[in-house]
Image (cartoon, helix red, strand yellow):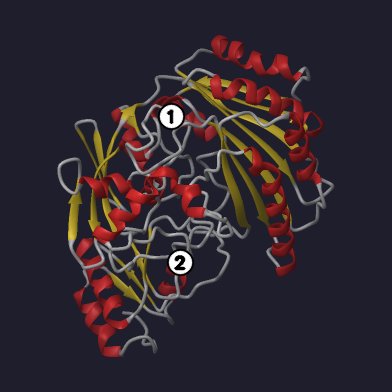
Amino acid sequence: MREPTTVPSAPAAAWERLEAALTGTLLLPGSAAYESARHPARLQPVDQRPVGIVRAADGADVAAAIAFGREHGVATVPRSGGHCYAGRSSTSGLLVDVTPMDRIEVADGRVTVGAGVRLGPLYDTLEPHGRTVPMGTCPTVGVAGHVLGGGLGFLGRAHGLASDRLVAAEVVLADGRLVWCDEAHDADLLWALRGSGGGQFGVVTSLVLETVPTPATTSAFHLTWPYEHAAAVIGAWQAWAPQAPDEVVPELRLVVPGDRRTAPEVSLFGMVLDADAQATTGLLANILDAVEAEPTWVFHEQGPYLPAVRRLNLLGSDLPPGAVPTDLKAGRSEFFRQALPSPAVSALVERLLTDRMPGYARECTFFAWGGAYDRVPVDATAFAHREESFLLDVTTVADDPTPQVRSAAQTWLAGTWDVLHPWGAGGAYTNFPAPGLEDWAAAYHGTNLARLRAVKRRYDPGDWFRFPQSVAPAEA
């Protein structure tokens, strides 16, 4: 039984009626369950305290929450995994937590997942079937948000984005209607859901995804170099990775800790799908020969796909279940169609070392694009970035997010983006939101923006589902 509390946004009787209408649970401030449920999976820029939390058991619960919000002028915000660095899945209004919707059903090469399913349980469920979905690797990330924003991962160059596998979805609209969309029903809504970002057109409660065969074997690798070789490694990676065969998944990361006592590092990690150790060694020789410096650490192991991912420490966590990381992340992303020229590479390498201070680290990750990512026409789905060579994500990780540290990190991030942006294609990855991004609508959605605004007008003409950087409905 929940503890009594006073919520100024609506009469107590209204909250009681909402609670009575739910199959799930209503949590209000003052209870231990509320305190646990209000925190997302990551530390957020602003610590939000919702006026209430609906832990929705089904679409009817979501519709009841939306109706309550509209009647009393309380914003309703859905949350699946709660990993959004920009805080979009937190609110001071009514939080609609879809975590209880965790059903997973596998049949005929497809998997149907509730909006509360996380990547880890989904992979575990699919593994005995010899099937998987091209998605990311963090086990606590919500499938719904990941898919709706695109969804890159180790299988992306071979099989495309997670959103490319979306074939149907159940959505609760702002007017309370429950809509099933697929290629034959409300196909324009399905198109919009495939890569534009979650929470804009309605609350997705269920998704149907086409699966792919799990790779029979993988050859995982992880190499590191001292930071003095960063420019050479970046140059070699740019010349090799985007043009590598589709089965090669090479990510490059530069990490500069805030503490000067810890040395910066350059890491190349990833895997080769369905390849033996000898073939992988041959592929890696392309970058090793170009760098002309021996790596200080090399890991190379052949084995099944999921264990290989876990071995790279990307499906594991040192945190206990339910714990929220205490570091605050912020970032800027940019797509590139051409390699960064040498002066830009040198400026980036130097920039990562500039004004190091305790409290926050800098990271820069290169993701190879191409392959199946680019084989889908730009207008076939809402995800517009189909002609790119690689994606670059620059982030700050603040372990001690004081106002001084936050300000320094933001200043450094903006300056670093200014160095890189002139060479980019102008696009940014929706699942790496940047609150301060100028001309964000064009950066996220490119030439698909006008159609997205038309879909928004049809399904949410009153713009109920809105947040900073959400798609606005087209004008009448």
Which residue corresponds to the image point at 22% horizontal and 82% vertical from the top-left? 17
Q: Is residue 85 visible?
A: yes
Which residue corresponds to the image point at 19% horizontal and 40% vertical from the top-left? 183
Give x and y (percent) for residue 283: 59, 14
- Is the residue 196 above or below the residue 5 in the image? above
Q: Is residue 431 visible?
A: no
Which residue corresponds to the image point at 61% horizontal and 55% vertical from the top-left? 330
Which residue corresponds to the image point at 40% horizontal and 75% vertical from the top-left? 93
Q: Badge 1 local density, few (<14 within 10 Å), some, or many (20+)? A: some
- Classify residue 126 by image quadrant: top left
Which residue is label 1 attached to?
Answer: 374
What amino acid is at disc 1? Asp
Give x and y (percent) for residue 202: 29, 60
Which residue extends farthest front?
476
Q: Report how far apart the C-alphas of labels 2 and 1 lie in the structure.
A: 33 Å
Query: Which of the two marks, 2 or 1, is nearer to us in this view?
Result: 1
- Is the residue 257 above or below the residue 283 in the image? below
Which residue is label 2 attached to?
Answer: 90
Q: Quadrant of the C terminus?
A: bottom left
Give x and y (percent) for residue 340: 67, 32
Circle 2: element type: loop
Near-viewer residue (21 or 351)? 351
Picture mark count: 2
Near-viewer residue (60 or 262)? 60
Q: Give the left or right position of residue 134, taking residue 338 as reference.
A: left
